[in-house]
Image: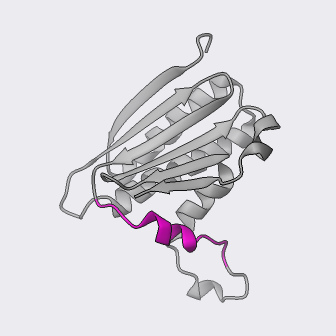
Amino acid sequence: MNEMNDVIQLSLPAKPEFVSIARLASSGAASRMGFSFDAIEDIKVAVSEACTNAVNHGYKEDEVGQIRMVMDCDVQSITITVMHDGESFNANEALKKLHPIDTTVDLEEVNEGGLGLFLINTLMDRVSISTESGVAVRMTKLLTRDGVEQIADKVSTTD
């Protein structure tokens, strides 16, 4: 990408079969920007989690919804925002529950839900969640590691 601060926008049906398109688009943009293989994998997983959350929690079973994804590519980072206009949630409560899997618990007792935001927070350098109208998850990955230590609060919310 010669011209930095490029913006890429996608609108996808909120259906599981379209999550892979969001993954491919984000990995293509990150690759063109020069991100490492590991960073691209982190971005793909974070985008998958955000889109999957939108599909699974954003709309009721009989509702037809859309996921909008905006990728803002500049010389220092890629910022990806995954948005939907469906059901919102209490982001502050969800963030209080962020934690890795408890290895002392039997695997059959592990609850599948709740790991998505934990993964997004772990894999990306900066995350903000807005639940004012639907949900918008904004995730930033820095191209170089120089600025990572300057970020104190990784996750912020606006309810």
Q: How many marks?
A: 0
Q: Residue at x 73, y 88 (%)?
A: 104
Quarter of the image that includes the N terminus = top right
* Outermost residue toward the top in this view: 2
Pick the front one: 110 or 92: 92
Q: Residue at x 71, y 41 (%)?
A: 39
Percent of width and height locating residue 6: 52, 19
Whether 103 is drawn above or below 16: the answer is below
Percent of width and height locating residue 132: 34, 53
Whether 108 is drawn above or below 18: the answer is below
In which quarter of the view is residue 63 placed?
Answer: bottom left
Most prominent secondary structure in the magenta stretch? loop
Q: Residue at x 37, y 62 (%)?
A: 56
Percent of width and height locating residue 16: 38, 53
Query: What segment carries the magenta color?
Result: 87-101
Pick the front one: 17 or 23: 23
In which quarter of the view is residue 43 placed?
Answer: top right
Q: Residue at x 59, y 55 (%)?
A: 155
Q: How is the image coloured?
A: one colour
Whether 150 is drawn above or below 90: the answer is above
Q: Is residue 126 left or right of residue 13?
A: right
Pick the front one: 75 or 155: 155
Quarter of the image that includes the C terminus = bottom left
Q: Is residue 148 magenta?
A: no
* Outermost residue toward the left in this view: 62
